[in-house]
Amino acid sequence: MLSIVVVFAARCLIIMLFLPFSALDKILNYKAALGEAAQVMPARSIAATVIFAGFIVEVVMSLAILSGVADRLAAVILAGYCVATALLWKQFWKAPDFRLQGASRGRETFWDFLKNLALAGGFLLLAFGTNAAGVKRFLDHPLASTQPYRVIQSGGG
């Protein structure tokens, strides 16, 4: 029972940025989210579509990871989502004040960029495991579950 609780808690930690927080923020602060998206997507309709798609990805993929249903594919999708959001919204290289010492908004954005990439790495570990065989297993069966809540009883003898 403890092992199931630990696995569930770990999965809650890796998705908690998205569900409930980022998804809820998109609802509660829709205008601000739309404004931020509009900085990258010039057409307001495209920005709204991107916000809606992000909301769906955050909710559906997070629930898949929590439930263990197609969780490996969901983890790959969230890894891609993290990389895409880092590249689109954490563009530290464009900050006019990026520097390594002293106050710098660009450096703060740089840390957010790295956090997105680190989270993507965590999702890829969830999808593939810790070795190359996991990548092959994913490619052979991308919709398969990791069966996170299955406990294998060791045989006593």
Image (spheres, grey):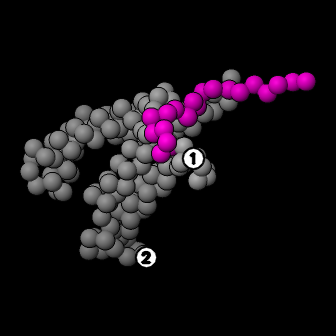
Mark 2 lies on residue: 101
Residue occupying image coordinates x 30% and y 64% = 91
Residue occupying image coordinates x 40% and y 44% = 78
Q: CA distance from mark 2 to mark 1?
A: 41 Å
Q: Is residue 57 visible?
A: yes
> Residue 134, which numbered label?
1
Q: Nearer the viewer, mark 2 or mark 1?
A: 1
Q: Amino acid at mark 2?
A: Gln
Residue span colored magenta? 138-157
Q: The N terminus is located in which quarter?
A: top right
- Specify the farthest residue to the right: 157
Identify the element where label 2 is drawn: loop
**Closest to the observer, 25 or 13:** 13
Magenta segment includes 7: no
Marks 2 and 1 in Cβ contact (< 8 Å): no
Q: The C terminus is located in which quarter?
A: top right
Q: Is residue 9 visible?
A: no
**Closest to the observer, 36 or 51:** 51
Give how far across and how far down residue 9 sits, in percent: 57, 33
Magenta segment includes 140: yes
